[in-house]
Image (cartoon, rainbow, N blue to C red):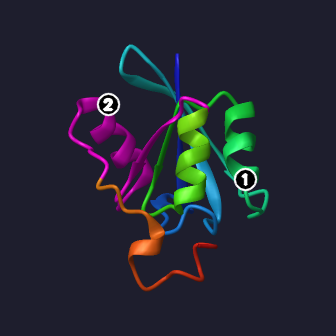
Amino acid sequence: MLKIAVASEDDMVAAHFGHCANFNIFEVENNQIVKSESIPNPGHRPGFLPNYLNDLGVNVVISGGMGGGAIDLFDEKGIEVIVGASGKAKAAVEAYLQGSLKSTGSVCHEHQHHEECGG
């Protein structure tokens, strides 16, 4: 089973991973979403969220943007990171499952929101 977490604002992909309102967690079997739930963001602290999502058994994280530190932590845990996503969280997961959602490598320090991303 695959577990995909989407950093979200309600049911839309959030622009900033650490400051999202909630995570939409999708469980996938045979390339089909079999279960989804929304959990509130437990809070942004350096290094906390990658461990938190890892503890939930997440395999893939989808977000609009993410700081380089978080990406490094996910990489260490073998969790795939897709950044540059937008639109509905469920649609992003479906695009990922179809192989059409590719990471843009949108690390947050590359644009004007440096402080917001905890850079």
Task: Tell me if residue 54 comes above or below residue 87 in the rendering.
Answer: above
Q: Amino acid at mark 2?
A: Leu
What's the residue at 68%, 40% (across, down)? 53
Q: Which residue is mark 1?
A: 47
Residue 48's spot in the image, x, y percent? 76, 52
Check disc 2 and report its element: helix, strand or loop.
Answer: helix
On the image, which quarter does residue 81 sit in? top left
Residue 62 % position (x, y)? 45, 48
Instruction: Please check the rendered image and state whether residue 7 is part of the magenta-colored stretch, yes or no.
Output: no
Q: Is residue 53 left or right of residue 110?
A: right
Q: Is residue 88 magenta?
A: yes
Label 1: how many Cα within 10 Å (few below 14, some 14–19, many 20+): some
Mark 2: few/some/many CA within 10 Å (<14, 14-19, 20+): some
**58 or 23, which lies in front?**
58
Q: Secondary structure at mark 1?
A: loop
Total numbered badges shown on the rendered structure: 2
- Which residue corresponds to the image point at 54% horizontal and 63% vertical from the top-left? 67
Q: Earlier in the sequence, mark 1 or mark 2?
A: 1
CA distance separating discs 1 and 2: 27 Å
**In this rendering, position of residue 88 left or right of residue 113:** left
Q: Nearer the viewer, residue 4 or 67?
A: 67
Q: Is residue 81 left or right of residue 3?
A: left
